[in-house]
Image (tube, rainbow, N blue to C red):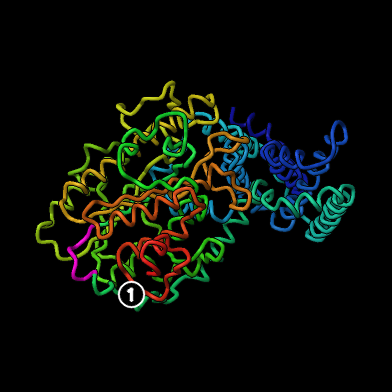
Amino acid sequence: MAQRLRLKRISVSLRVFNILVAGWLASFTNIGFYQHLSSFSSFSGLTQYSFIFVTFLILSGFYFFILQILSWQHSAKVLATVLIILTGFSSYFVNQLGVNINTDQIQNVVQTDVHEAVDLLSIPFLLWLIKTIVLPLALLCYLKIEPTKNIKHLFLDKLISLMVALFIIGLGLFSFYSQYAPIFRENRELKAQISPLNILSSSWSYAHKNVKTQNLPLISYGEDAHQISYAIQQPAKIMVLVVGETARAQNFSLNGYPKMTNPELSQLDIVNFSQASSCGTQTSVSVPCMFSGMPRKNYDQALAAHREGLLDIAQRAGYQVTWIDNNSGCKGTCERIKNYISPKDQSAYQKWCSNGECQDEVLLAALNDYLKSMDLKKLKQNQLIVLHQMGSHGPAYYKRYPHDFKKFLPACETNNIQNCDHNSLINTYDNTILYTDHIVASAIHVLQQTGVPTGLIYLSDHGESTGESGLYLHGTPYFMAPKEQTHVPFLFWTSQQWPEHQKIQHCLSLQKDHAVSQDNLFPTLLGLLDIQTKVLNPQLNLLAQCRGSI
């Protein structure tokens, strides 16, 4: 039997082998790219099909050209295996979820944790991998590459085939140059949809950027930071900053959404900014950006990675800074603060956790315990506490809230969200917003009971696409990102004991419908904490109208 199986193996030359692999890499695994390219063209009918076919030939010729250079007798199958695996993974997210594979997405992969990665697994995902990885690799095993006895003939064959590949690529580009030139000039994101080119080029860019910024010295920022003199004489304050996850403003009933997703917050005396925008479309960009002190248009991710930020400045000015995390870390923003608490890693909080993932009530429990550890009646040091939510992190939205908050039905109880009907998907997402409403409102109630001056700011890192225009999740390049990914909820609350409470509430209320952004967080929060430093931009400080420049 084994002998019969060996006889069935097909012998092919290295050139033919590379043609087959190149054709596979450029095939239906790039259907999403071909569909988008077609939508940007001015063709229709047979001409449109010809345009896509020529594009397939160009892409096949490109991959064949690369394979002919890199593939040799003993390395061809190894290289083909790697490329097929990368193509299978990247093509799923591009074709099924509309996610562009760029440098920021590679950074997301590197910075994610095991539980977030597991949430991406689904039956359709596994079936896709079987279809695009397992089956082609099985076929690969039955191909035998013929050994080349004459090295001169091999080099000559490679040279001729490279010239043919270049000719095909050139002829194809020339045939439709009038279409390719404007399409790719105006839609540079298309290259992020070509597998496996997208994952290879983005990984290289990410690695190159990391090498450049690795081991760079820490740059001090706001070294002159200090609390203004009259504030030092006042009772110690507690400020809580809730960093939301994947919440979009349009699903907040506070902003006019028809479903009641904010029943608890709507009963509180808060200031809700209805027109807030994010710095990025993913956590790894938005969180460092909002703490960096750099406006979005001037944001330098490499600089932010080795420069002090908001938390360093608050700590320098005398605040006790604490980060309580129920997500995948602080993305470098809290590396130098003294207190980092991850309640999901502590046995005392496991009632809110399952399989390593915790619902956000674990943050409330940790906040309660942390406040109880202080003698609030004799509190001497001002406190800045950051709560980092799991929030509405997808695609497993149904895991983000307990059963009591499963209000909007029917729900999409799978991470295979692209196969849910839109109504059930939105219901599930709205349930996560309902739960976030409870978490933020409960945090305010906890602070109200302390009897000391307290305040809270809630700001989501970015929004989320739930099937609009065929897009899911987030991470779309900012210049082309839909409002669902950039329009975020942003709200303030201060207790009656907070200095100038009424004046601050009134002043901020006058700006609640103005266009604001995460750019405003850095100067406004430090201003609210009575911290003065030359690095604050008064034009972005929402409190400047309340008390003059701070």
Residue 427 image offset from top left, x and y in percent: 45, 27
- Magenta span of residues: 231-238
Eyeballing the image, is 103 above or below 472? below
Residue 155 image offset from top left, x and y in percent: 80, 60
Q: Say whether residue 307 is left or right of residue 472.
A: left
Residue placed most toward the observer, 383 or 321: 383
Q: Residues within 10 Å of mark 1 (few under 14, many from 20)?
A: many
Q: Say whether residue 382 is left or right of residue 119.
A: left
Residue 39 image offset from top left, x and y in percent: 75, 38
At a point 86% along the width and 51% down the height, the residue shown is 177
Residue 429 image offset from top left, x and y in percent: 44, 33
SS category of the residue bearing label 1 = loop
Q: Is residue 480 magenta?
A: no
At a point 49% along the width and 54% down the height, the residue shown is 516
Type of residue at label 1?
Ala
The image quarter in which residue 12 lies: top right
Q: Say whether residue 456 is left or right of residue 61.
A: left
The residue beneath circle 1 is 225
Most extreme residue toward the top, as rendered? 410
